[in-house]
Image (cartoon, coloured by chain):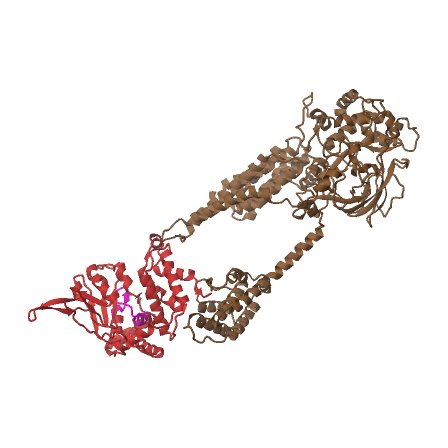
Chain colours: A brown, B red
Amino acid sequence: MMARAQIPDALLAAACTLAVFAPMRGLFRDESWVAPALLTLIVVLLLGIVGRMITARPMFVSIIQAAGASIVLSWLHAPETLAAGLVPTPTTFVRFGELAAEAQQVISNYAAPAPVPPGVAFVISALVAFMALIVDLVAVTRRAPTLAGLPLLTGYLITAANTGDALPWGYFLLAAGLWLLLVARQGVGEMQRWSRIMPSITGRGGRTQDPTRSIVAVAQVTAVIALVAALILPGFLPHLPTRYVADGLARQAGGGGSGDISLSTTVDLAASLNDPSDRVVLRYRTTDRAPGPLRVDVVADVTGRDLTSDGVRVGPKGLGERPVEPPQFEEPTVPQTEETQRYAMTVLGSALAAPQVAVPPRVVSGDFRAVPWGLDSTGVVRAGRKASAFQVSYLRYDPTVSTLEAADSYPTDGPARLWEGDRDRYLATDERSGDRLRAILNTLDTGSGSQIATAAAIQEYFRSSRFRYSLELEPTQRGDDGQPLDPVSNFLETRVGYCQQFAGAMVLMAREAGIPARMAVGFLPGTPQADGTRVVVAADAHAWPELWFDGVGWVRFEPTPGSRATSSPEYATNPDRPSTSTGPTDETTSAAPSPSSSAAPTAQRPEIDTETDPTTTTNQVTWRDRLAAVPVIVWLATVAVLLLVGLGSAPLVARWITHRSRRLARDDAERVEVEWQRLVADLSDIGVTAPVGSSPRQAGASIAEDLDLGQDQRDALGRVVATLESARYARPGASIGSVEQVTRDTDAVLGAARRHQHPRTVWRARLFPAATLRRWREVLGGRGGRHRS
Amino acid sequence: MTTVEYDGGRAPHPATMPLPQVLEEANALSRALNGVIEGKPEVVRVALTVLLAGGHLLLEDVPGVGKTMLAKTLAKAIDGSVRRIQFTPDLLPSDVTGVSIFNQDSHTFEFRPGAIFANVVVGDEINRASPKTQSALLECMEERQVTVDGTTYPLAHPFIVMATQNPIEMEGTYPLPEAQRDRFMARVSLGYPSPTSEMAMLDHHGSVSPLDALRPVADAATVSAMVATVSQIHAAEGIRRYVVDLVGATRRSPALRLGASPRASLQLLRAARANAALHGRDHVLPDDVQEMLVPVLAHRLILSGEAQMARQTSQQVLEELRTLVPVPSPR
């Protein structure tokens, strides 16, 4: 009974579950969930041991564990609903539902690290209990520890997919090591039982040896080879675009198998930035030769690591077939001057899920081909359904410094003024980082003190060498009060971050300076291709601040230095400060680059990075890009064609093998032999085989027995066997009968056999005649080969 | 030293006969034997096969099941010289082979042939004789000749030794040496008769011994011709390879300490030929080989310790090997 309880295995399985959930600590702000989860795990473990002692039925063991876990969960998480303080009531389960809903709310609203309200603690405990139960059932009760690797891996991936950063390798090593120990323990146990029941048959030269030894040797060699291959092979295998194998591990919401991508505004952008898969988000063509970033969404609350869309979400129902009436500007009062250029953008393929659309700001008209679309309250373009191909025309507005300076003196009743409600929202500051931001702001040389000069100084501050661009953030610092710093303060302290930190900090600093600001989220303009299109991949995700200038509208800035950003706009790098090379006299002439002037980008775009510079990226179009650019349908079609060809070729090859064998036969004896081989192979394919050591006569008897042949077929089979015996064993030159008759008899027997077997078996044999194909080498090798009847 | 000519009816180049005639004669012999040995047609068949293959037969079983009766019946059914040796612990080799005696009259040594000089030699209870005497049979059986005092005397043709022995566990027996056992083509056990056969036996044997009524059905020359004919039966290359594969498998089997010898391969093929002839075929089939596998090989094998511990018998090991060794096919 103790042996059936399998205590060591159960302990190992529980340890595996624990190890898999250990990295989850990084997902939450505190560890109040750990104790309840641990308690639940222990309950499941102990009940498993006790359950196996009581009953041998796996189902009952699981039921005992599940019931016990539910009761403990109710004690821990819903004690107020219990009857007599012990027994769960229907209210308990209602409470469970509420807790789960709360957890869902937290999970969808927060990125790691998330707070741990009771709901989250409950869901984690329930998850741990469920996982422990599954692992215990599979690995211990059902004795299939290998299979338990799947749920364990799932559990591990839940954490791995949500941390945003790479998990420390130690976590994986611990979980994998424990699991391997579990597998090995039971494997060795199985092996020992084999050695007891297996007769020693694998001797050589009369010596007897432990039959398990050869199996162990094979297993050891296999293990070593597998390990070495697992370490070495990834170094050599080409990294194919993962969308064709598996669409990543759902690193972003709406990802998964559909191939859709949605730029998450609720989760840290780092996930998208870190996405190594090169999955193509967008492929487009534009008449603008130096396009700016493509905007997907705008965010007002930039204080945390979480970004929440600012726009009023417009669902598919809210959008009718409402075309945008041109010229409908995002800021309709922007004068259409020579600073405004109109461009057309043709999207050839977009993987963004609805309602997100990646387009430049200031879209004036569009053709979304039956997909309802429109602008939401923030001027962001939304689509009712996934728009994979569409056309828009947009205005690129590169205001001059003087235009922007005019914003300071814009009349308060002017038409192009931010609505007061919006103004408050876009001026909201964060008290946690306010002091730091103001302190920095005071040290900046804002020149004339105009809004544009201030904004340029702020951008200049972040673009300076003080800050370093990195997707790996430094650990959170602690403030003077000993509490962890808020993300913006932390960024200002550590001075390490990526676009999201830079943009967020600039937004807040601009607000401190009294300039309404918001964060735009979207993509870099992508990599130009040889065919004139541009390809945007997931790793091109980007965030940048937009500052409001009365009379002008939202103006893009670029505080992010380094390669994963666009160039700084002209107006921002050209502030009216004496220290800059561009004097005030140049201001009026330094108009925004026109399409023609941007053809020579190096002069005006000194800070442009190599990844986005068209002159250097054109020759970087690799075969992988081309592979990634092939539409999925083409891949599917190719695979389908290959499958069809593969399916069709097997019977053809088999037919050819028989044909060739017949042609190679030198005399009637060999022809009879070919027919016999055909009979044996075809029968073997439909699952009828004679015992190994049987003579033709015995094989015939066994086949007749297996197939329950009628008298006619029995006679036919008898004739085939008799002819074969004559052909094989009679004196050379003796008459062996008619080959044609043998062929007819063989066909008759095979026909009867096919009628006797299940049609599915017969069709499988027809499509893949394995036994015939096995003779491939013998036939290719010509004569002289030996094979068995 | 002179060679004393002894002609025991030996024909150096026996004539052959058509296959149907062989079958006919064999059936006559079979009927005669089955008339005496009730209910054991398969044992009779092996005995006949060994006779036609020109081998020697070892009958091994507990006392009283009719071993000697079978040997005597076969001997009597053949119209040839028959000698019976009762092996005892004090039997001397010279009693078997013969001895040179000094003739006072001629002042020469004269050879007195021993019991071995006959067409059919019935060696009763062979394992009761000392190993020395058993060894005297070695040369006779394999080379069909006797050498005494440096003189070689050929034996009769046909020449078949039919020895009976009790299982070696019985008291007062010397186990037959491996070399001796290897010289017997086949070993058969009669086993107890079925109740019906035993009832019939009680009826028949009560009044008169059926052996007394038995008349010879074939003479020595006929048997020689049958043996010569059987040796001409065709064995295809596949059959020879099958024999080699099977014998090779016994040498590799971990269940066996001693596998079958090359002599065993020869005798297995000869036995298979005889079996084919008894089926009226002029060529050997794998089935013939399989049929003779256990009678021809079983007594030559020595089980390994593990197999003995597992209470396996050499018959079981051979049956298992037969299911493992595939029948070769050409091409």
Q: Nearer the viewer, residue B308 or A243?
A: A243
Residue A356 vertical position relative to residue A478 in the rendered view, above or below: below
Magenta segment: does it hold A75? no
- The quarter holding residue A150 reads top right
Q: Which residue in the rendered view is the most extreme toward the left?
A: B105
- The quarter holding residue A612 reads top right
Residue A785 in picture, x, y percent from top left: 47, 62
Q: Nearer the viewer, residue B316 or A349?
A: A349
Q: Is residue B200 left or right of residue A721?
A: left
Q: Nearer the viewer, residue A78 or B29?
A: B29
* Residue B63 visible here: no
Q: Nearer the viewer, residue A704 or A116?
A: A704
* Residue A157 visible here: yes
Residue A104 in picture, x, y percent from top left: 70, 39
Residue B307 vertical position relative to residue B184 in the rendered view, above or below: above
Magenta highlight range: B46-68
Query: Residue at (31%, 61%) from the top-left corner?
Result: B299
Residue A360 in picture, x, y percent from top left: 81, 39
Magenta segment: does it hold B67? yes
Residue A623 in picture, x, y percent from top left: 68, 46
